[in-house]
């Protein structure tokens, strides 16, 4: 029996609580989003009822203060957000909104206003880009992780620090490179984005590349390579080979050079493969050195 002011968690020892927390982290729940728990089933039931024209959400969705156990505050109830549109509709809207953006600021604003990707609801914030949008080379990764989600900047965690060292190895830093991801919101628990999420976000990253208008695209890892270059092979086969990448920028149609290399997060797990990336970086440096200066 709970005393006044006690919560169910008071019944557990510190060791039990820390093991519960560890279990959550192992399950991919590694971020506290809110002070109060949300019953997402009740929230979507309420949203469905609202769509059907019901006057009020069900009691299950909106616990009244009187329902709260004595001595405990009623849970805070977040406003019920409309569920994202069906994926086909979302991908269509994404394409229209991305195409309408005439510069990177407009594209960022379009993404901020876009509710078609469910990942936006679990991420803390949009992770749009870092570096120099005028750079001649753009690096594109898969999706933000926990550190990126906290700071709103791509590649700032351990993988990002390794990316910075990779750039430094060929005399680059973030003032000479533009950095983005295929997916701009962190997938919960850093899981791999689903094909549906990727398809919905693709028009935005394609437009981001076009509006940045670089001369060279570097795909970091299999996911970016497969999504942007349309290759099916694994990254070991794809990496280090130049391919053409078409862009439709406001300045017109252009074909730029693209190359894939291993993702820095993979290199943290398989450091022996850094020698392969070194070769790709040398290729990249040669290509950058061969560019004619911009007028
Ligand atoms: N991995 C990515 O692909 N992107 C980031 O921004 C961070 C880690």
Image (cartoon, grey):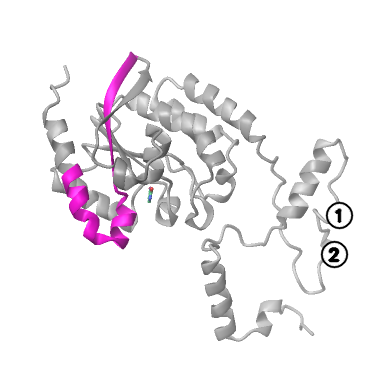
Q: Provide the residue span drawn in magenta.
A: 251-280
For image coordinates 59% across by 46% down, the residue present is: 121
* Mark 2 → mark 1, Cα distance in angstroms: 10 Å
Tell me, yes or no, if residue 7 can be seen here.
no
User: Quick check: marks 2 and 1 in contact, CB under 8 Å?
Assistant: yes
Q: Disc 1 on helix, strand or loop?
A: loop
Q: Is residue 97 above or below residue 271?
A: above
Residue 119 in the image: state x and y as whole percent. 56, 45
Question: Which quadrant would the N terminus be assigned to in this image?
Answer: bottom right
Question: Which quadrant would the C terminus be assigned to in this image?
Answer: top left
Residue 161 in the image: state x and y as whole percent. 27, 54
Q: Is residue 239 above or below residue 78?
A: above
Q: Is residue 170 magenta?
A: no
From the viewer's side, name the closer residue of 132 and 65: 132
The image quadrant of residue 73 is bottom right
Give the labeled residue for mark 2: 67
């Amino acid at each position: 029996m709970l005393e006044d002011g006690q919560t169910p968690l008071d019944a557990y020892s510190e060791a039990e609580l820390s093991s519960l927390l560890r279990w959550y982290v192992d399950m991919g729940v590694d971020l506290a989003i809110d002070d109060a728990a949300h019953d997402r089933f009740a929230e979507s039931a309420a949203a469905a009822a609202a769509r059907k024209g019901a006057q009020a959400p069900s009691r299950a969705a909106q616990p009244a203060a009187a329902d709260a156990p004595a001595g405990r505050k009623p849970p805070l109830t977040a406003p019920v957000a409309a569920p994202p549109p069906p994926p086909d509709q979302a991908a269509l809207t994404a394409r229209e909104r991305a195409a309408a953006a005439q510069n990177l600021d407009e594209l960022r604003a379009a993404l901020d206003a876009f509710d078609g990707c469910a990942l936006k609801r679990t991420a803390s914030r949009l992770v749009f880009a870092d570096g120099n949008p005028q750079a001649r080379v753009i690096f594109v990764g898969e999706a933000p992780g926990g550190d990126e989600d906290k700071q709103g900047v791509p590649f700032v965690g351990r993988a990002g620090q390794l990316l910075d060292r990779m750039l430094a190895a060929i005399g680059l830093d973030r003032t000479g490179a533009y950095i983005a991801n295929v997916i701009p919101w962190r997938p919960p628990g850093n899981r791999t984005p689903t094909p549906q999420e990727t398809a919905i976000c693709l028009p935005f990253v394609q437009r981001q590349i076009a509006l940045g208008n670089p001369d060279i695209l570097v795909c970091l890892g299999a996911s970016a390579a497969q999504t942007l270059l349309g290759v099916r092979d694994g990254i070991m086969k794809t990496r280090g080979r130049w391919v053409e990448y078409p862009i439709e920028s406001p300045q017109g149609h252009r074909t730029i050079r693209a190359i894939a290399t291993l993702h820095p997060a993979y290199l943290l797990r398989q450091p022996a493969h850094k020698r392969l990336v070194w070769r790709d970086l040398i290729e990249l440096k040669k290509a950058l050195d061969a560019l004619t200066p911009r007028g």
